[in-house]
Image (tube, rainbow, N blue to C red):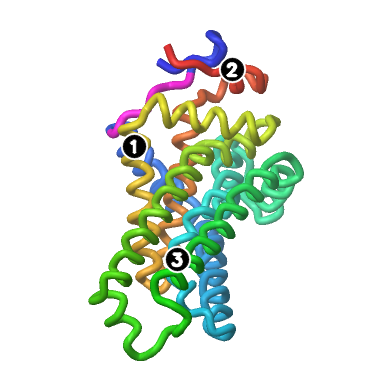
Amino acid sequence: MTNIDGRQPLNPVSVNDLVDIIAAGARDFFNAPLYGLVFGALFAAAGWVLIALLLVLGLPYLAYPLAMGFALVAPFAAAGFYAVRDHLEQGKPLSWGGVLGGVKNAIGRDLRWMALVTGFALVIWMDIAAFLFFAFTGFHGVGPDFLDRLLSTPSGVLFLVLGNLSGAIIALSIFSISAISFPMLYDRDVDFVTAMVASVRLVMANPVAMCVWCALIGVAMGLSVLSGFVGFLIVLPVIGHATWRLYRHAVPVGAPHDEANFTHMKVV
């Protein structure tokens, strides 16, 4: 078991637990489908707008890394689902004013700084993607033979390998610090560094289950991108609610809110 300063336990997470957590997340979505669909649609619309902007600016080669990089900011976009689930747990009636008010209150605390961290990671990933593109394909831009050069030349294949490997490393790093940090920052008045430490410790204590969870999120996000972002209408709500469930599973509701408990966490 993982303990926080020898007092506060963090429950272990298994692959079987993930099955129950995902099922619970799906039930939460269907219990309040309107909120899930609206937040998912807004996230999808943001993707369409950004991709269109890249095409207008003549930067189509950044469309793929931007689309895949959306997974880095998805935890912040899921804050609305944390508010929905929190209202349901407390027996409060659901309303747009209550849900948005809950998100606003959380952003007023350190949730905004955690969002800045993941947003900065997305910018870094886009910079790396642009650098790799020009390093391996030159400054010829995206021409009629671009796809052929990408798949049939050594430099193109190497670009694909290194690009996806770099993205995977960044995604895994961000996942480690955000696995439960966003719902924790919504639920508790702790600083974002404390939340990141708790998240990393949880991942380190449960590497198999958390790697499976990371892979499932990556596959779900990838399929959503391939669907033209339409899949986010279902995928984002389910993942958002499931992330809250994962947080509740790892950190019991009755756990003390003292941030020192999370900062000095150790595995025993």
Three-letter amino acid code of the residue under disc 1: Leu
Per the model, the C-alpha gap separating discs 3 and 2 is 39 Å
Vertical relation: 236 (above or below) 25: below
Mark found first going from the N terminus, 3 or 2 = 3
The amino acid beneath tag 2 is: His
Q: CA distance from mark 1 to mark 2?
A: 26 Å
Q: Residue furthest bottom?
A: 144
The label shown at residue 18 is 1
Residue type beneath disc 3: Leu
Tag 2 residue: 264
Q: Position of residue 232 (x, y in %)?
A: 44, 63
Q: Nearer the viewer, residue 89 or 254?
A: 254
Helix, strand or loop for disc 2: loop
In x, y percent, where is residue 179?
48, 39
Query: Element at badge 3?
Result: helix
Cα separation between marks 1 and 3: 36 Å
Query: In the drawing, does residue 226 fall left or right of residue 65?
Result: left
Question: SS at mark 1?
Answer: helix
The residue labelled by disc 3 is 132
Please tell me which residue lies in front, 35 or 216. Answer: 216
Check the image and report above or below for 172 versus 206: below
Q: Indicate whether residue 205 is drawn in magenta.
A: no
Q: Which residues are magenta?
A: 10-15
At a point 32% along the width and 88% down the height, the residue shown is: 145
Front label number (3 vs 2): 3
Q: Nearer the viewer, residue 111 or 96?
A: 111
Say which label, 1 or 3, has the lower sequence index: 1
Question: Which of the marked residues, 1 or 2, is nearer the chain's N terminus?
Answer: 1
Is there a contact, CB below 8 Å, between mark 1 and mark 3? no
Q: Which quadrant of the figure has residue 234?
A: bottom left
Q: Residues within 10 Å of mark 3 (few under 14, many from 20)?
A: some
